[in-house]
Image (tube, helix red, strand yellow):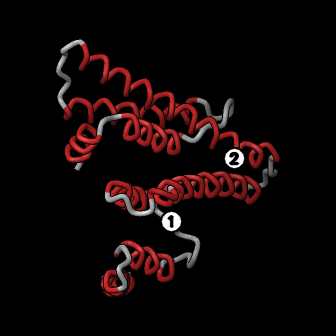
Amino acid sequence: MLASLSLIFIVGLAMGAICQKLKLPRIIGILVTGIVLGPYVLDAVSPAVVVPRMVTLMEKKYGTEKAIPQMIMAGVSCDDIFVIVLFTTFLSIAQGGHANVLDFVNIPVSIVLGIILGAVTGYGLYLFFEMTYARKHCVRNSIKVIIVLGFSFLLVSVEGWLEGKISLSGLLAVVAMACVIKMKSPVFVSKRLLEKEN
């Protein structure tokens, strides 16, 4: 395991440097290394790595004209949804259960509902922040970050509460909420919120 980690670190840094020389973002080299050297070659994508990097690319305006970072972020979330649904289905089969066709039908439903719920929540938070600002109530950026985090945890929890009733992706809802807040808020506000989160 230590040898694998050292290989990933060294090759990842080397590939990052090569991409930088080719005028490409370093993250491409690091992602390629993780994909090739990871335990599930060409299977493994981590939102914890991809999402922050895509947000950085959006702030630097790389590929935003064609919405490339946004599509990659959505793809990462969709990938996780497919993996979780397929894993639980095949686990049920392995334990003597049976595959439910509705599990596969619920995949696009969970994606759409997650995006809708997240977008509505994000727009609601944006309106709340704007309304408090218009009424001269000062909500500090650190408080805004805590509110956004609270709603992020709530959205992920909603997925668990509705399990077995309505299929919904909490992770995709969080991503949609963050995107709406960023799109609707003035640049200096979203920049300050990002600084507080870091």
Count of all numbered marks drawn on residues in the image: 2
Mark 2: few/some/many CA within 10 Å (<14, 14-19, 20+):
some
Q: Which mark is residue 107?
A: 2
Quadrant where the N terminus sits is bottom left
Residue 45 vs 176, above or below: the answer is: below
Element on which disc 1 rests: loop
Mark 1 crowdedness (10 Å alpha carbons): few <14, some 14-19, many ≥20:
some
Residue 137: horizontal and vertical position, in percent?
Answer: 19, 16
Q: Residue at x 44, y 76 (%)?
A: 34
Residue at the image point whose x is 54% and y is 53% from the top = 74
Q: 145 or 37, which is in the foreground?
A: 145
Kindly identify the residue that appears in the image at 46 percent across and 28 percent down. 121
Label 1: which residue?
A: 45
Marks 2 and 1, the one that precedes in the sequence: 1
Classify residue 41 by image quadrant: bottom right
| Residue 119 on image: x %, y % | 50, 33
- Measuring 43% from the left and 74% from the top, which residue is drawn there? 31
Position of residue 193 relative to residue 4, above or below, is: above
Identify the element where label 2 is drawn.
helix
Q: Give the percent coordinates (x, y) of residue 10.
A: 31, 86
The residue nearer to you, when weighing 74 against 35, is: 74
